[in-house]
Amino acid sequence: MASFHVYAGATNTIEHPAIRRITVADVFDALRRGLDDFWDKPSHYVFLCLIYPIVGVFLITWTSGGNALQLIFPLMSGFALLGPFFGIGLYEISRRREQGLDTSWKHAFDVRHSPAIPAMVAIGIMLLALFVAWLFVAQALYSWLYGADAPLTMAAFFSDLFTTQRGWTLILLGNLIGFVFALLVLCTTVVAFPLLLDADVGAYAAIETSARAVRDNPVPMLLWGLIVAVALLIGSLPFLAGLAVVIPVLGHATWHLYRKVVDVPADKKTPLPPSPEKGEDSHFPYWLRGS
């Protein structure tokens, strides 16, 4: 039986995958490949990613009715901090397409059989903690400038936001602090989840490899972060509906960016689940089945 491991891989050793140097052209090529993956079967990916606009609309409705209008933007922008975790299924689809395998949407859920799931969950919890911390910081900034009272109406809040000094201070400081959180997520998870899906290296190696990828490719990686931020902003404008397209494209592109940046030896990679043979019990994870 596979051992439960989080910090390191199954062999209890810390891997250090090699990092390749990439260019700005590689970033745009990864984005193009992500778009190609999306267009392969777009209806499936839109279905999978409808949760993003639905959750976004729910958050807006909740904040509007719960005297928390000041948290609308922090919630919407902070929700993107969790994006790397929720893109895992999309990375799996791209991995399968890369190898010429079936890319039906049901395979997005094959990741639940990955031996690296504990490490993925651990990093996901880290992202959730950053998301909660961002909300607390955003609320503290609002309270410092506006006091303890929540805005009464959305119209009044936005009017004050764009016409007063404290409003512009909130915008500038809020975006600056948000940039710090986004940069932290970029540096720790830009290739973490694709790497864990591709090779069971453990949470430490996944985060450390992401940090080295950003360190060795600062301009391309910062460009990638900017592309993600702009794309999410554009996708959020028409009542968040555009996220149903933006999220899967970015998810697939993340896989291709990982493949360009990280060099994992073939013998270290996690094999894709084999097609179940007739009569085989496919309910068991593939690494627990007999050979």
Image (cartoon, rainbow, N blue to C red):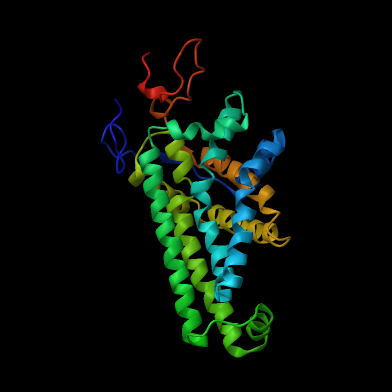
Q: Is residue 130 left or right of residue 253?
A: left
Q: Number of callouts in the render?
A: 0
Percent coordinates x, y for residue 41 in the rendering? 70, 34
Who is closer to the viewer here, 224 or 115? 115
Q: Residue furthest left?
A: 12
Horizontal relation, residue 228 to residue 155: left or right: left
Viewer-closest of 3 and 251:
3
- The residue furthest top is 278
Residue 148 percent location from the top left of the image: 47, 85
Q: Residue at x 49, y 55 (%)?
A: 186
**Where in the figure is residue 122, as x and y percent of width and height?**
36, 48
Q: Residue furthest front?
A: 65
- Residue 156 in percent (x, y) is at 66, 84
Establish if 265 lies above or below 57. above
Kindly identify the residue that appears in the image at 69 percent across and 41 percent down.
Answer: 35
Seen in the picture, residue 30 relative to 58 is either above or below; the reply is: above
Residue located at (61% from left, 52% from top): 52
Whether residue 208 is visible here, answered yes or no, is no
- Residue 189 visible within the image: yes
Name the side, left or right, on which 174 lies relative to 25.
Answer: left
Quarter of the picture containing the C terminus is: top left
Q: With 93 as the anchor, is 189 left or right in this view?
A: left
Image quadrant holding the N terminus, namely top left
Q: Residue at x 50, y 57 (%)?
A: 81
226 vs 219, nearest the viewer: 226
265 vs 274, nearest the viewer: 274
Give the quadrant of residue 66: bottom right
